[in-house]
Image: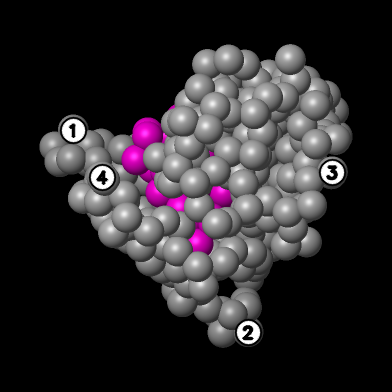
C-alpha cells in the first residue's frame, strides 16, 4: 500500500499541520516515524517514493516533509528529491532528507542550492534535532511541542536545548567562512608562481598525521580541508564529486555538507553537473578562491603549512 494513516494511539498531537513521510522501504519508514513522533509532531501520511510526489502536490498544508532513503529509488527518488528542493525554495514547507553515504551523490545532484536539511548516516539525536530546527526556522512563532504538558518533560526539554544549540551552530556556519574571506580587490597583484600538486598533498598528509597523536576532532577545520582538496584536484586536473569532498573535510558528512553549502553560497566553490552522469555533480574552486589559495602558498614559501 502506498499510503496509510498512522494509528492515533501512536501519535503525539499538536495543533500544527502534519509531517508527511516518504521512505524507500519498511526499515526506512520505521526510522522516519520514530523521529517525527519523538519531536512531538503529527504524521499526516506514510508514503512510498512512487506515490509521494502526487500526495505532496495534493497536500494543502504541511509542517514538513521527511524523506528517508536507505536504498537507491532510481527515477522516483530523483524526481521526489528535485520536487522537495523546489518546494522548500518556494517556502511551501520545511524538509529533511536523511540518506546514506552511498546515496549522497545522486541526492546532492538533485538538490542544488537548496534549503533542505540533508543528513548522512546521522544518529538519532542529530535526526530529531534537524527536524526540530527545520520546523522551528520555518515557523519560529510557534513551539514544536509543549514541554510542560508531556509526561516525558525532561527528555523533551533536553531535546529543545539541543535544537537551540544546533540552530546556533548553523548560524555560525553560515557566517564563519564569509568573515574569513577577503574580497578579490584586496588580493595581492602580479603573476602567480606555479604550485605543484605534491606541495599541497604534503600539507594534506601532514594534517591527517595529527590524528596519530591527538584526537582528530581537536583540529576540525572542514573549510580549509576542502579548500586544500579542491586545490590539489585543480592542479592535478581531477574532478571532485560531492561525496569525495565530504570525506576530505574530515568531519561527519552532514557537517561537511553544511560547510559545502555555505562555501557555495559565498562564491568560493562552484557546482558543475557531470556531463556523463546526471546523478552526480562535481565541486571546484571558484577562480577567486583558486587565486587566493595559490597566492597564499606563494607567500608562505617554505614555511610549514598545516
Relative side of 224 to 113, left or right: left
Secondary element type, mark 4: loop
Assess disc 1: are there few (<14), some (14-19) or many (≥20) residues with their C-alpha within 10 Å of its C-alpha: few
Q: Secondary structure at mark 1?
A: helix
Disc with the residue nearer the chain's start (1 vs 3): 3
Q: Position of residue 155 (x, y in %)?
A: 25, 46
Q: Disc 4 or disc 1, which is closer to the eye? A: 4
Relative to 304, say whether 143 is above or below: below
Q: Nearer the viewer, residue 199 or 115?
A: 115
Q: Which residue is mark 4?
A: 152
Q: Is residue 166 left or right of residue 188?
A: left
The image's mark for residue 185 is 2
Left or right of residue 87, residue 162 in this image: left
Q: Earlier in the sequence, mark 3 or mark 2?
A: 3
Front-lying residue, 28 or 188: 28
Main SS of the magenta segment? helix
Label 2 vs 4, first from the N-terminus:
4
Choose the circle earlier in sequence order: 2 or 1: 2
Callout 2 crowding tier (Cα within 10 Å): few <14, some 14–19, many ≥20: few
Residue mark closest to the camera, 3 vs 2: 3
Mark 1 lies on residue: 212
What residue range appears in magenta?
116-136
Q: Which residue is mark 3?
A: 58
* Mark 2 → mark 4, Cα distance in angstroms: 56 Å
User: Which residue is painted at 36% across and 62% down in the image?
Assistant: 164
N-terminal label among 4 and 3: 3
Asked whether 130 falls inside the magenta stretch, the response is yes
Amino acid at each position: 500500500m502506498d499510503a496509510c494513516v498512522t494509528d492515533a494511539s501512536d501519535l503525539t498531537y499538536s495543533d500544527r499541520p502534519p509531517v508527511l513521510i516518504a521512505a524507500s522501504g519498511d526499515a526506512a519508514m520505521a526510522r522516519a516515524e520514530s523521529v517525527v513522533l519523538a519531536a512531538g509532531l503529527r504524521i499526516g501520511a506514510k508514503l512510498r517514493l512512487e506515490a509521494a510526489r502526487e500526495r505532496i502536490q495534493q497536500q494543502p498544508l504541511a509542517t514538513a516533509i521527511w524523506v528517508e532513503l536507505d536504498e537507491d529509488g532510481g527515477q522516483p527518488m530523483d524526481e521526489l528529491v528535485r520536487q522537495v528542493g523546489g518546494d522548500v525554495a518556494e517556502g511551501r514547507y520545511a524538509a529533511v532528507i536523511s540518506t546514506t553515504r552511498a546515496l549522497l551523490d545522486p541526492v546532492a545532484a538533485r538538490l542544488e542550492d537548496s534549503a533542505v536539511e540533508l543528513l548522512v548516516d546521522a544518529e538519532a539525536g542529530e535526526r530529531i534535532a534537524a527536524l526540530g530546527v527545520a520546523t522551528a526556522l520555518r515557523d519560529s512563532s510557534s513551539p514544536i511541542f509543549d514541554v510542560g504538558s508531556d509526561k516525558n518533560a525532561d527528555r523533551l526539554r533536553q531535546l529543545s536545548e539541543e535544537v537551540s544549540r544546533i540552530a546556533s551552530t548553523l548560524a555560525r556556519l553560515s557566517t564563519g567562512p564569509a568573515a574569513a574571506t577577503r574580497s578579490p580587490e584586496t588580493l595581492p597583484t602580479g603573476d602567480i608562481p606555479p604550485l605543484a600538486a605534491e606541495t599541497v598533498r604534503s600539507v594534506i598528509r601532514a594534517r591527517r598525521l595529527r590524528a596519530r597523536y591527538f584526537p582528530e576532532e581537536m583540529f576540525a577545520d572542514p573549510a580549509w580541508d576542502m579548500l586544500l582538496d579542491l586545490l590539489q584536484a585543480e592542479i592535478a586536473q581531477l574532478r571532485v564529486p560531492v561525496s569525495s569532498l565530504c570525506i576530505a573535510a574530515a568531519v561527519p558528512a552532514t557537517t561537511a555538507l553544511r560547510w559545502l553549502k555555505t562555501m557555495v553560497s559565498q562564491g568560493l566553490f562552484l557546482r558543475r553537473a557531470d556531463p556523463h552522469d546526471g546523478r552526480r555533480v562535481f565541486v571546484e574552486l571558484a577562480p577567486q578562491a583558486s587565486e587566493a589559495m595559490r597566492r597564499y602558498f606563494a607567500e608562505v614559501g617554505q614555511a610549514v603549512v598545516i
